[in-house]
Amino acid sequence: MSTSFSTLRRIPPAIWALGFVSLLMDVSSELIHSLLPVFMVTSLGASMFAVGLIEGVAEATALIVKVFSGALSDYWGKRKPLAVMGYGLGAVSKPLFALATSVDFVVAARLLDRVGKGIRGAPRDALVADIASPALRGAAFGLRQSLDTVGAFLGPLLAMGLMVLWANDFRAVFWVAVIPAFLAVGLLFFGVQEPEKPQGAKRVNPIRRENLRRLRKAYWWVVAIGGVFTLARFSEAFLVLRAHEGGLPVAFTPLVLVGMNVVYAVSAYPFGKLSDSMSHTRLLAFGLVVLIAADAALAYSNHWAWMSVGIVLWGLHLGLTQGLLATMVADTAPDDLRGTAYGFFNLVSGVALLVASGLAGLIWDRLGASFTFLAGTLFCVVALGMIAAAPGISHSNAKQNT
């Protein structure tokens, strides 16, 4: 325990600030997103396939935009301005959800929100890697992810309380989300100082062929494994809809994300710290096994007991894997191409998420919820096979950032 606190004290203040920026923005986003699937289905008449497609397109947009923002941050040598721009767009999008009167309006708001996320994502992750020393990198990513996830369960918890207080008034709850979003932008602008880059460094196009050749085979294996992993973990909107299908009242559907994100928040930092001292591939494989168990429970039944098991395990797998994948990208990419590396990683993950969420919605409409979660287990098995075959991405080989 004392070792954990000692590590926390060594993490730079800017990492803590970035974590609280993520916390505030996630409170805002999850106030909306924990209710949005049910709002679209019950108030706007959307189908399950439409929900899956919208979620997939929205998240894929965010991840694809990261390619360009990450490469731009490498070329420019600046991460923070792009992060501020991205968080600013996210904040501006929040009032649009409260004003939405059709599915098309929701799509527009969701895309603007996710473009903002895409702009900020890769520069922010590269900024974390720039600030944290290699020996603390896993802990730093775990801490930021943990604080981010605290927001991800506070948001749904607040949404649930406000829905009960305001008699299921979706739009009133959506208006509340505007406040923490703008607080996040202010904290980032005033509270984070970006490290100085060497003076006189030559600017080069980071996506030129000779630079892309510097991304080693180990990095591309991480990208490929991350893509298949994303196919296995479609949008959490389907967890919310599974619980609603099982009889959970509309006002209490945010409990699904609350439960999942409590586990995620509690586990992200310890597993991030653990990744600094053990095999990354072994830890990632364990995360996939946990996801298989979650999918099996959710496929078996929508009874509250099985739902609870599935939700807890889903949160645990996120705590095991999300900060770890970010660390693996940082460890297998050259320092000056870090933003670009995150960009390409997220491009592949974005396309995979679009396919996964659309496919999940289609399977749900055609075959039922159980088959949706069973399909996730098949992709987990494929990812496990890829981890077993991947050369040179274990922790012992990952620090060769030349």
Image (cartoon, helix red, strand yellow):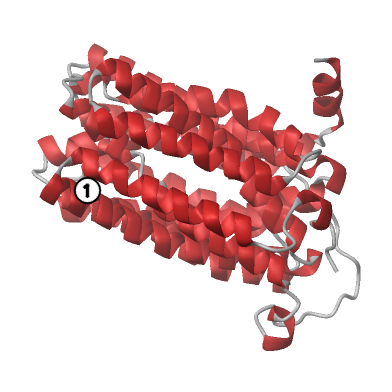
In this image, 47 relative to 270: left or right? left
**Which residue is farthest left?**
45
Q: Where, by quadrant of the figure, is residue 207 drawn?
A: bottom right
Q: Position of residue 338 (x, y in %)?
A: 72, 63
How many numbered circles are shown?
A: 1
Task: Name the one closer to the observer, 383 or 226.
Answer: 383
- Which quarter shows the N terminus? top right
In this image, 273 relative to 351: left or right? right
Task: Name the one closer to the observer, 20 or 94.
Answer: 20
Task: Name the one closer to the observer, 207 or 352.
Answer: 352
Q: Position of residue 213 (x, y in %)?
A: 72, 81
Q: Where, by quadrant of the figure, is residue 132 drawn?
A: top right
**Which residue is farthest top?**
165
**Which residue is farthest right?**
199
Residue 194 visible, this orientation: no
Three-letter code, disc 1: Val
Q: Residue at x 53, y 51 (%)?
A: 384
Q: Residue at x 74, y 44 (%)?
A: 279
Position above or below: 121 against 205: above
Task: Name the one closer to the observer, 185 or 364.
Answer: 364
Q: Position of residue 229 (x, y in %)?
A: 48, 52
Residue that badge 1 annotates: 51
Q: Residue at x 50, y 54 (%)?
A: 383
Residue 270 visible, this orientation: yes
